[in-house]
Image (cartoon, grey):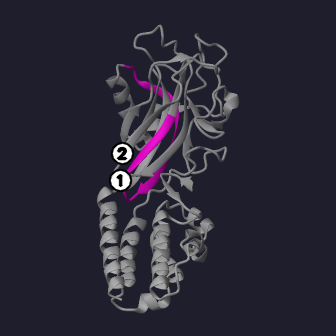
Amino acid sequence: MKVLGGGFHLGGLPPAAVLVGAVAQFGRARDWQSRGRGFDPHQLTMKSSICQATVSKASYLASGLRWGGVAQTSTSVFRSLIPATNLRKRGSPMRSFLMVLLVFTSSVGKSYATGPLNGGFETGDFIGWSTLGDTIVVNSSFGIDPFEGSFQALMSNGPGAPNVFNPSNVFTYSGTDSVSGLSLEGFFGLPVHALNDFSQSINLSFVFEGSGIKQSFTTNTTAVLTFHWNFLTDEAINSLNPPFLDFGFYVLDGNIGLLTQSVSPSNTVFLDETGYRDTSVTLSPGSHTLGLGVVDTGDPSVNSALLVDGVSISSVPEPSTLGSLGFGIVVLLARRIRMMRRH
């Protein structure tokens, strides 16, 4: 079994397709037994079922749909696993079962969540993301291990000169300067002064400059978006009031959230950091846009930065749908047993 995003697959097939194979093999074994051919336990395997399926592991993974391949594979799996006579025999229990399961898997196949693409930045760059300002993908040589994998995204409000707290940290990390707060608002699709209003709502000054990244994705089922972040700063926030003068933030569908907490000394070029924290948000079906950024407030001096890693989305199971499948399986198997006893 291999984990793939928020779901899992067996041998390259979605779990519902494997379920079909297991039940189909059970039905075939029972048919053989009822016809006096005996029961061979070695025939009750999912390996032979999966091998006969017409959908390869590569095509399923390439689809990027964690459950989305089910509907497309259901019919071919049925035909490769069940004798044609069982399917054509009108009124047979197996035919009825497959028809109900086909409807179920078709509906499950439509419940998927795509992206965010390259959420772990493991390509070593920003493929799948849009960027603005001082943004770069770094590895552990930056001084902090990525939350997962080998890479993480870094964005800063550099160049940050002068820096009275940390004079050596006055540069950008990508070679591109950060941009104005107004430019960031346009980049994230926010109204004019939205970042300033948010900054003032947490008792800070106006936004001077910053950088950010964003990506849009779609889910047609309820899903949970999770990302991991680490805010780094030279603002000497242990000795100032308010406790920070720069801040990290996220923008989800036009709503701004704060990514700044208490800090401790950092092993990087920065003085302090929060360490990796995580944020999770439940999403409704539809199109969404996630933005992540960091800004200077009040002045262009003193650097701060935001590291981001492990941006992922996972589907939320629907108990009612799974319950309906379970009930349908029980009813259909009971019917099949009764039919077999009559013979």
Q: Which mark is residue 282?
A: 2
Q: Quadrant of residue 261?
A: top left
Percent x, y for residue 79? 50, 83
**In front: 25, or 284?**
25
Location of the C terminus by quadrant is: bottom left
For residue 162, side relative to residue 200 (left or right): right
- Amino acid type of the residue tagged 2 in the rendering: Thr
For residue 303, side relative to residue 72 (left or right): right
The crowding category of the residue bearing disc 1, from other C-alpha atoms within 10 Å (few below 14, some 14 to 19, many at least 20), is: some
**In front: 93, or 341?**
341
Percent x, y for residue 241? 41, 10
Secondary-structure class at tag 2 = strand
**Residue at the top extreme, as displayed:** 239
What residue does disc 1 label? Answer: 222
Name the residue rendered at 40%, 79% in the picture: 98
Percent x, y for residue 214? 50, 44
Location of the N terminus by quadrant is: bottom right
Question: Does residue 192 show up?
Answer: no
Name the residue rendered at 37%, 68% in the picture: 107
Q: Which mark is residue 117?
A: none
Name the residue rendered at 61%, 50% in the picture: 127
The residue segment tinted magenta is 204-228
- Amino acid type of the residue tagged 1 in the rendering: Thr
The question of residue 310 being in magenta is answered with: no
First reached walking from the N terminus: tag 1 or tag 2 = 1
Q: Do tag 1 and tag 2 residues touch (Cβ < 8 Å)?
A: yes
- Above or below residue 31? Residue 13 is above
Look at the magenta stretch and give its main secondary structure: strand
Q: CA distance from mark 1 to mark 2?
A: 7 Å
**Residue at the right extreme, as displayed:** 141
Percent x, y for residue 296? 49, 24
- Above or below residue 275? Residue 319 is below
